Amino acid sequence: MSEPSGSRRLDPALEARRHLLDGYASFRELPDEVDVRWKAPFGPPEDWDLDVAPTAVAGPHGPVPVRVYTPRTPAPRGGRACLVWMHGGAFAWGDLDMPEAHEVARGVAGRADAVVVSVDYRLCPVPPELGGTGDDRLDERGRPVRFPVPQDDCAAVLAAVRADPARFGVDPQRVAIGGASAGAALAAGVTVRACEQGRPPWQTLLVYPLLHPGVPEPDAELAQALAAAPPALTFPPAMSEAIDRAMLGGGRETATPYAYAGLSDDLSAFPPTYVENSEFDAFRASGHRFAGQLRAARVDVVEVTRPGVPHGHLDLVGFAPAAATLDALAARLSQA
């Protein structure tokens, strides 16, 4: 496991922008112009020679849009490794164009000579505490989208890729699943379901994941890191509670391992797993706890803490630590 840097300072590129966040207690308070300046690209997007094709797969709640990223180089015999990838966004935000979806998919596919299938799962309503109406996104029956609808969408995509590997140009024995933040929660929940069905994915790749209802209490070291971070980059408990309600549609007592894999009583069938936490991120407590649960279940798990970064660093274009994370994900997919 990589230990945090202990410097209590953000990556230098972010430290140079820290002043933009002065005086703001949460990201919800940031004016649009400040948010744009904070997230402005640190460099140009990476250049990869890929075919990018929109399509859809059938799901229990209707078609699930996906975007398939395929290298243009000749495919190896038997097909390429594949990553089914889910972006984050607190289960309520995000799309296939955000860097955490598009740039991650491009970067991983290019680095690993792999196929990445990016999933446009159905989003839950934005909770009132975070500026939404709480009922603005409906499922096929006219009800607000809640668990297990997003999980069902992601499970349907994993199943479709494995059922028809020739359609996607992939090796059916090397289909991994992964995601960031809420997308990591979805990936882990789908993995739990697949394990119970006797068909775990090849690997599960989780970046700054939320894997328990309610963020676990930070240990002393993480508490110090959070205290040193700009408040606008942190997740107070009330925000975590709102995220849980948005997805679950009820109290945390309604959560199951399909929603939050950290609730599982038996993780022994989990595939090899990569867990990457961010140094200045309250969710690090959840990722660290889950990695410990996997180790206790004798699962092959690699846990890394990315130094100098807050939650969501994959959404920053041209950011060196984001590229380092993509290197790590691609290295996993390049395994024989």
Image (cartoon, helix red, strand yellow):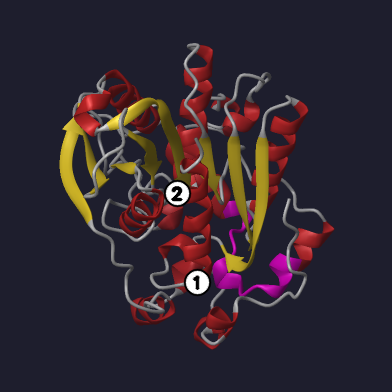
Give me the C-alpha separation between circle 1 and circle 2.
Answer: 24 Å
Residue drawn 31% across the image and 38% down it: 121
Residue 222 drawn above or below residue 251: below
Q: Position of residue 304 (x, y in %)?
A: 66, 52
Q: Does the segment drawn in magenta span residue 48?
A: no
Query: Which numbered mark, 1 or 2, is in the foreground of this view?
Result: 1
Q: Amino acid at mark 1?
A: Ala
Q: Which mark is residue 90?
A: 2
SS under mark 1: helix
Residue under numbered circle 1: 320
Quadrant of the image occupied by residue 45: bottom left
Residue found at the far right of this picture: 220
Q: Position of residue 74 (x, y in %)?
A: 24, 43
The total number of labels drawn is 2
Q: Does residue 251 appear left or right of residue 49 in this picture?
A: right
How packed is label 2: few (under 14 Cα within 10 Å), some, or many (20 or more)? many
Q: Which residues are magenta?
A: 225-238
Residue drawn 59% across the image and 36% down it: 273
Q: Is residue 22 visible?
A: no
